[in-house]
Structure formats: C-alpha cells, structure tokens
Amino acid sequence: MGKKQMGGYAGTILYVDLTTRNILKKPLDPDFARENIGGLGFGTRIFLDLIYGKPDFDALSPDNPFVLMTGPLTGMMMNGVARWTVCAKSPYTGFWGDANVGGYFGAGLKFAGYDGIVITGASEKPVYLFIKDDVVELRDAGQYWGKDVYAVTDSMKADLKDESSKKGQVLAIGPAGENLVRFASLVHDKGHVAGRTGMGTVWGSKKLKAIYVTGSGKVTPAYPDRLKELRDELKEVYEGSIFISAMQSSGTPSHMDVGILSGDIPIKNWQMTEWDEIDELGPAVIEQKISAGSRTCFGCGVACKKEAEVKEGPFKMKKGPSPEYETVATFGTMCLNSSIESVAKANEICNKFGMDTISCGSTIAFAIECFEKGLITTKDTDGLDLTWGNSEAIVKMTEKIGKKEGLGAILCQGSRKAADHIGKNSHDFLTTVKGLESPMHDPRSAHGFGLAYGVSPRGACHEASLTFEVEGGAIFIPEIPELSSELPLGSEGRAEMNVAAQDYGMFFSNCAVFCNLGAGPLTATPAVDMVNHVTGFDYTLEDVLNAGRRVWYLKRGLTNLFGARAKDDRLPKRLMTPMETGPSEGSVPDMDLMLKEFYKLRGLDKEGIPKKDVLMDLGLSKLAELLYP
Amino acid sequence: MPVFESSEKFNEVLGGFFRLLANTPVIADKLLESKLIIRFNYTDPDLVLVIDCSGEKIDVRSGDMDTKVIVDMKMNADIAHKFWFGKVNLTMALTRRQMIAKGPVPKILKLLPAIKPSYAMYPQYLMENGYGEYNIH
C-alpha cells in the first residue's frame, strides 16, 4: 500500500543523542511499520540495530540505548489503547528489560508528531527533553534534579504551561532513578508507571530527568467508518463483561476477592495462600477506608485507575493514585500487613521516589523473613523492628530504600543482590527468576504461570505473554485453539499454551499495545480488525502471530546475548515448595516437563538459546549473527 | 450426561445446601449484611432458586420467578455443582460466559470471601445427607 494511506501512525521517530546533543527526526518507513506494527515491534528492531556493532556493554553506560515507542492505536479515542512501551538493557537484571505503561503521554507524543523516541549516549549534566510539535530541545534540568516525581510533575507543568496552549504531559524519574536504585521506574502523571526492570535507572545513568511533551496535531485512522462500526458492535460486549464491570468498580484490586479463592495470592513471602485478614485489603475495605474516586487513560471509558486518600493517622496522604492489585499484594499480603492505609502510603512513596512496587515490596518481604530468622537484626535496620505486619516499619523501610539509607542501600539493589550480601540461607527466601521478583500470581495454583515466569525474557513477569490472562481466565481467544481449550489441572498442555500466548501476546500488548485490562474483552478477530481499520494494513491473524513470534525471539535472543542460559529459566525454590494447605495444596508446576516441551516447540538448544536456523527462518539474521558469531 | 438426573433431585441437593448455608452463622451473617436478593437460573436440568437476604433470615425459594431480584445469575447445573467444590475458575467461567451475572458487581464480589468456607462444607454435606454419589474425587 502507498505511504499516504497509512493511518494511525504519527510518521516520525525522534533520535536524541544525549552525548552530542544531536537530535534527528527520521520518517517512519511504511514497510518497517507494516512488518513490525509498533511498540516493542519497533523497539526490539531499533535496539538491535543500535547495539549490533557493540553488543557487550554495561546497562548503566552511555552505550545502552533506550527506546520509547507507541503503537498504531495509541492516541485513538477508544477503550484500552492508550499504552506505549519502553525498552533497554536492564540495569536490574543485566538481561533484556522492557515495560509497558498507559496514561496520556503516548497520545501526547503522537499529537506532537512522533511515534517514538530513541535515546542514546549520556548527558554530563541533568537535562530534560522538551517537545512541542516541531520544537525538540534538550534543556537544563538543574532545577528539577533531586525533586520527587510529584514535585517535578507539578513544577514542570507550571513552568512550561505558557509555552503551549495545549496541556503538557510529563514522564519523569524520581530520586530513586537519579541515585541508581536498581529497580527505579519511569512515572507519568504521578501514577502511570513503567515499573519493571529498572528503566528509570537507565534514565538516571543518562542524567535524563524528564520528557515534557505537548502536541497540537492528531492521529487519524485509515478507515474511520469501519472503525466506528466495529466500536459500535463492541459496546454490547463491554456492557456484558463482568470483568470490565469489576475493573470499573474496584480496579485491579478486585482480584483480591477472586484470587484468594484459587490460591493465586502470595502471602507471607509466598509461604501461605490463606489468611484470616485478607478482607482488610479487599475492594470493600479499600472503598470504605481510602477510596477517593477514579481516573483513566487517554480515551478509555473503562477507568480502572483509582484514587486514594488517607485523611489522618501515621499514613496520612493527600489524594493521589491508589495502589494497584500488585502493590496491595506486595506491601500487604506478602508482608502480612493488613493496614490498607500503609499500603497506600508505601505506594505513594514508590511513586514519588520512582520505584517499582513489585520489586520494592517483595524485597521488603524478603528482608522481613531474614529478620524473623535472625539473618539481620535491629543493628542492620537502624533499630526498625522489621517484623511481619509491622506497617510502620514497612513504610519506613520503603522510604529508606528510596533514599538508599542504611539497610535501604542494600535492599535498593533488589532481593537477589541483597541475598548475596546477607548470605547464609537467605537465597532460600528469594522469589526471583533472572533476578526479577515474581509478580503476585502463584504458579502453584496455575502451572502455566510457572513456565511463563521461567522463560520470560525479562524475568518473572505475568505480562511477558498472555498466559496469565488466558490460564487465569480473564481473556478468551476462541480463534486460537491453544488459547481457548479447556485444560486439565496440572502442567499438561501448558507449553503449547505459553507459545501461543507469547506469539499472540507480543502482537496484542507489545506491538499493537492493547491494554490487557481495558481491551480484555476483545477476541482476536476484532483486535486484528481494529489494527487494520486504524493502519489501513491488511493483516491476517497469521500475519500478526508471525510479527509477535519475531518479537518474542528478538527479546529472548537479546536476553541470551546478555548472558541468560537454561539455568535461568528455573523457578526459585520458594515457588517450587508445595503448600501444605489451601486451594493449591500439594501442587507445584512440573518445570522439567514444561521446559522440555517448550524448548522443543520453540527450537531452543540445551542452553535455552534459539537455534540459528530458527532465527534465520524468521528473518532475524542480525540476531543470529550476534548469537552465532 | 449431566451430573443431576432431574430438576427435582438438583433442587433437593442444591436447595438443601443453600438452606444449610442459611443456617450457618459464619456465612449467613455476611450474606444478610449484603441485603442482596439473588436468582440462580440453572439449566440442564432446569431449576430456579432465589436466595433472599433482604430480611432477618435468609429465605431460599425454589421456582420463584416473580420476585424482583438485585442479582441474576445463569449457569449450567454442572458448573454450579463444580463451583461449590471450589473447582471452577470463576474469572474464566464469567469470561467464557459459562456463568452470566447481572447486577451490582462490587456487591457480587463482596460475597466471594463470605462464601469461601462453604467449599469445605459442600462435600461433607453431600456425604452426610446421602448424596455421596455426587462427590467429586
């Protein structure tokens, strides 16, 4: 198809070299767009091209490229399409790193005329990137450096509001990123967070404090009438979806009520799946004690994001983003902490400092277990009584991590490195795969999660494919047999499901960048149709599965290039220890079986590396050259 | 082949279980707090059960199509039977429309923790009341 017909995309990618301060605007090649769709489809390709000549580098060095990419649907006024992606080598794990985030920033970037930003090099002094349509400048960030995310967001919006009639969007790091806390995040609008794998740490190493974007343009679909017709058809689907209703009423913490039934929620650092105080962290108590309204992402009527406020007491906080399910679990159930107010406060601290709540909360749960078992004492914690359920100590330790103060200077490197420091048998308490703490969904209750965590290129992650959504039941893809069959309990069939969930998931939430929550009701047919109506391309399901498959192999191959091997695909001892009671009693994933089947299906060698012929068949010759020099 | 051979038998078993729950304070108290009136529309075999938590005691009524309810649930009888063993992935059943729920979602979700103890009661109830043949092993 001709260039003029390509819809959805802004049409330009920005290249910013922080070392030379050189800024380039490169037109988006329609053939490149057609082949890779967008998001991490673009990100993985561009990243590979940039490191091809020098693949051996430190994640905190100027040689680590950072790539931010929107999808073709980002900026459309529709449910579940506001998201965008970031990627780089992870300074937290040393392997491939990426994250996915919503809000208004992606739409703002496209309205300014850009599908994405590629950042290379490093600045000597703190800078921020200012984007206002054609005006793109690196500016001194001296006045913002050292400020927390909330402060810099408010200051920057106030300082720059006169430069444009359109509202500006801020993406920033906090003190954690500046100080190279290894799980630092990027935070947009105070509560939309690219949390996992330390992408904020990459910015800190580059002395990039923020990106401010304001745009006056718009993005238009190739076939607006077809898109409107499809959206009208989907209204009934959304209205009938109890999953969407749950998201609208309680957001992701609605999972507290459902997950406890199946043993999905880790409790006491993954040592329990039942707890008498669980309801204290559930949606009803959240509504009663901290709820302060809803907010949403650009164009999305689902509005699953919630606001919280704690009016009095030791955890007093102003109205701001409410903790998501993962945060309620990491700072709540994982630490046996039933104070929802303290969870909201810990969430606020993480957002202000710019830290991943999953890694931070899990690392604190790990430290509590070390304290309980005498591996660390009050001498290590500056007097803090770091015991299960001590909500004040948990909140204080969160702040210490952000400040790299006392034990916080150890824990800020994450639980795996903290275990190396603490020694003795503390490694037994770890929940990490490839150095990344597992998310709050227990593979002992759904074995496919175990394989998903194991083989995920970025480490233990419930969003590295659609396995969590499919096996957990939130997404149903009848067009793909592996994603719609009724599997028996256990590990059987999970390898096939994981492969399909990776291929389709890379298309769905990595390339098209659909939201796994807001776009959850979409099956494959409307999802592919939507991409076609917006872009004007003519993808089939097979086309998008092929694109997704390439992205999975690129991420996998890059993580192998950075040193990951078969041993890194294993679950930690803690997750492989069967529960003695509860819904998942006696059940552990059969990792030997699933990995054996998975390696065969994916064409991985015994070290877990994609075989050369598999990569060549997918057209990934550059990756093959790096892995097989 | 459905688990229950007739509507009468299903009513006897499941209706009886709901009446047991209605008389179990740890569960009944929370259900009564909800003030919900729920109609379960079962198929294969067909049965309608209304669980009325709006009064001082829980009232379980079979065949009541007249009461204006707050929550309307539809599902196959076999799915309902499996549910009380704690063997149904609720999210999946709802997504795949094996269970269809209409009504205020927060109030429905709030019931889940309340009924959790009933999972352990159902197999015991079946055994103690001569319905052991329906137990899932």
Image: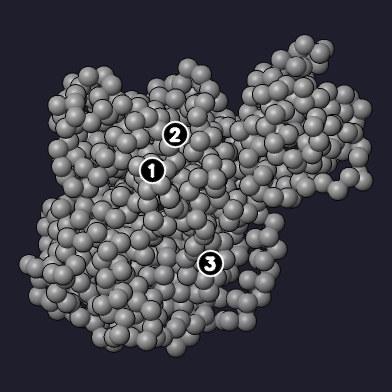
Is label 2 or label 3 in front? 2
Q: Is residue A291 visible?
A: yes
Count neighbours of disc 3 (C-alpha within 10 A) and say few if under 14, some if 14 to 19, many if 20 or more. Answer: some
Disc 1 secondary structure class: loop
State the separation of the CA atoms marked 2 and 3: 32 Å
What's the residue at 42%, 49% (across, down)? A310
Question: How many residues crowd around disc 2 within 10 Å: few (fewer than 14), some, or many (20 or more)?
Answer: many
Residue position for label 1: A313
Q: In which quarter of the view is residue A72 placed?
A: bottom left
Left or right: A350, with A89 as reference point:
right
Q: Position of residue A360 (x, y in %)?
A: 29, 42
Parent chain of label 3 = A
* Placement of A46 over or under A607, stated as above or below: below
Q: Does mark 2 fall on the same chain as mark 1?
A: yes
The amino acid type found where label 2 is placed reads: Ser
Give the residue displayed 50% in from the left and 36% down from the top: A280
Q: Farthest residue to the left: give it.
A: A124
* Circle nearer the N terminus (1, 3): 3
Image location (x, y in percent) of residue A9: 42, 78
Residue A462 versus residue A63 in the image, above or below = above
Residue at label 3?
A: A300
Q: How many marks?
A: 3
Q: Earlier in the sequence, mark 2 or mark 3?
A: 3
Residue in front for this viewpoint, A522 or A612: A522
Q: Please, what secondary structure does the residue beneath circle 2 have?
A: loop
Which callout, 1 or 2, points at the residue further toward the start of the chain? 1
> What is the chain letter for disc 2?
A
**In front here: B99 or A557?**
B99
Q: CA distance from mark 1 to mark 3?
A: 34 Å
Tell me the residue that label 2 is attached to.
A338
* Discs 1, 3: same chain: yes
Q: Quadrant of residue A365?
A: top left
